[in-house]
Amino acid sequence: MRLSTRARYGLRAMVDLAQHYSPDDPVPLSQIAERQKLSEGYLEQLMTFLRKGRLVRSLRGAQGGYILVRKPDSITIGEILRCLEGSLSPTECVDEEICERAGNCPTRLLWKRINDSIKTVIDNTTLEELCKQSEN
């Protein structure tokens, strides 16, 4: 599985917001862009996805910027990646409830195991954990 630039850069932006988290102080987009070496225009597009996914909120004005909607310890990497990418399954047949080959497909179980492993990691890793790992 290869994640898109949208997912990788979006996750970097979310980690940046988590590292500078304050429930009352928005982080200006320009600061995130500068620290993460990302285009402000592209970052704005990513924030649109994250805002629609209810992971961030925006505040306008001179003191405006973006704020996580929940504490970093309650936002999982899985939530972020799905918001930015959609399904993360390695194949479509893992997502589909009914597959005409499900009963006799020799590879479906492998794809399901891979999918389950990925889900376990991303759904049990929070922004806070990534922030702590980056401190070391």
Image (cartoon, rainbow, N blue to C red):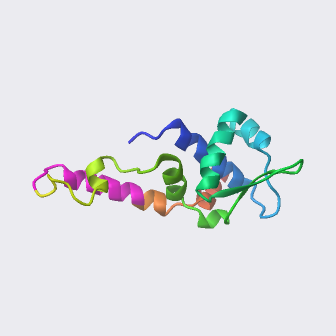
Q: Nearer the viewer, residue 104 or 52?
A: 52
Q: Is residue 38 visible?
A: no
**How far from the left and from the top, in percent, is residue 133?**
60, 54
**How far from the left and from the top, in percent, is residue 44?**
69, 41
Q: Based on the picture, tell me whether residue 133 belongs to the magenta stretch.
A: no
Does 63 sit left or right of 124 as displayed? Answer: right
Does 101 sit left or right of 127 as displayed? Answer: left
Does 73 sit left or right of 107 as displayed? Answer: right
Q: Choose top left, top right, bottom left or bottom right for residue 130.
A: bottom right
Q: The N terminus is located in which quarter?
A: top left
Q: Choose top left, top right, bottom left or bottom right for residue 38.
A: top right
Q: Choose top left, top right, bottom left or bottom right for residue 132.
A: bottom right
Examine the rendered structure and indicate whether residue 125 appears above or below residue 136: below
Dominant SS in magenta:
helix
The residue lying at 53 percent from left, 43 percent from top is 7
**How far from the left and from the top, in percent, is residue 112?**
27, 56
The residue lying at 74 percent from left, 58 percent from top is 21
Q: Based on the picture, tell me whether residue 106 belongs to the magenta stretch.
A: yes
Extreme-right residue of the structure = 62
Examine the rendered structure and indicate whether residue 3 appears above or below residue 77: above
Q: Is residue 123 visible?
A: yes
The residue lying at 59 percent from left, 47 percent from top is 11
Q: Nearer the viewer, residue 99 or 120?
A: 99
Boundaries of the magenta span: 104-119
Extreme-left residue of the structure = 104
Does 128 sit left or right of 8 as displayed? Answer: right
